Amino acid sequence: MWTTMRTLVATGLVALTIAGTSIATASQAEAHNNFGRGVAAGIAGAVIGGALIAGATAPPAYAEPMYAGPAYAPDYLPPPPYYPHCHVVWHQNAWGDMYRARVCD
């Protein structure tokens, strides 16, 4: 089914292309003296093409953003010389209620 549809679409596009080229082309050649217009078109094309090429090779014209802060290297804190040994113990308050407490050496 899809192959048939693709073939039909491709055939229609080929027919449309052939019909369009036969309508768009001239039936006979007409020779006129268009030297001045050709030179003008060539100069205009050279100017426009040169401007495009010059613009493509130019460095970007964007300035650095005003809001950017200074670049700095982050300062990392050194690790502590030792890690304290902590454990959980149960204590009793004045009313006899038990609670846990963390005790470190």
Image (spheres, grey):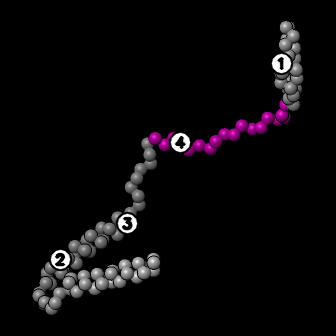
Q: Is residue 80 magenta?
A: yes
Q: Quadrant of the N terminus?
A: bottom left
Q: Earlier in the sequence, mark 3 or mark 1?
A: 3
Q: CA distance from mark 2 to mark 4?
A: 54 Å
Q: Is residue 5 magenta?
A: no
The residue that mark 2 highlights is 40
Q: Earlier in the sequence, mark 2 or mark 4?
A: 2
| Of marks 3 and 1, the one in the foreground | 1
Mark 3 is surrounded, within 10 Å at the Cα level, by few (under 14), some (14 to 19) or many (20 or more) other residues, namely few
Q: Amino acid at mark 2?
A: Ala
| Of marks 4 and 3, the one in the foreground | 3
The residue that mark 4 highlights is 70
Front-most of residues 83 and 99:
99
The residue that mark 1 highlights is 99
Mark 1 is surrounded, within 10 Å at the Cα level, by few (under 14), some (14 to 19) or many (20 or more) other residues, namely few
Q: Amino acid at mark 3?
A: Ala
Q: Is residue 8 above or below residue 44?
A: below
Q: Which mark is residue 56?
A: 3
Instruction: Tell me if label 2 and label 4 are in contact, CB under 8 Å.
Output: no
Where is residue 2 shown, x and y percent of the image? 45, 77
Q: Residue furthest front?
A: 1
Q: Earlier in the sequence, mark 4 or mark 3?
A: 3
Residue in the picture at 86% in, 26% down: 88
Instruction: Tell me if label 1 and label 4 are in contact, CB under 8 Å.
Output: no
Q: Is residue 22 above or below residue 72?
A: below
The answer to which image quadrant residue 39 occupies is: bottom left
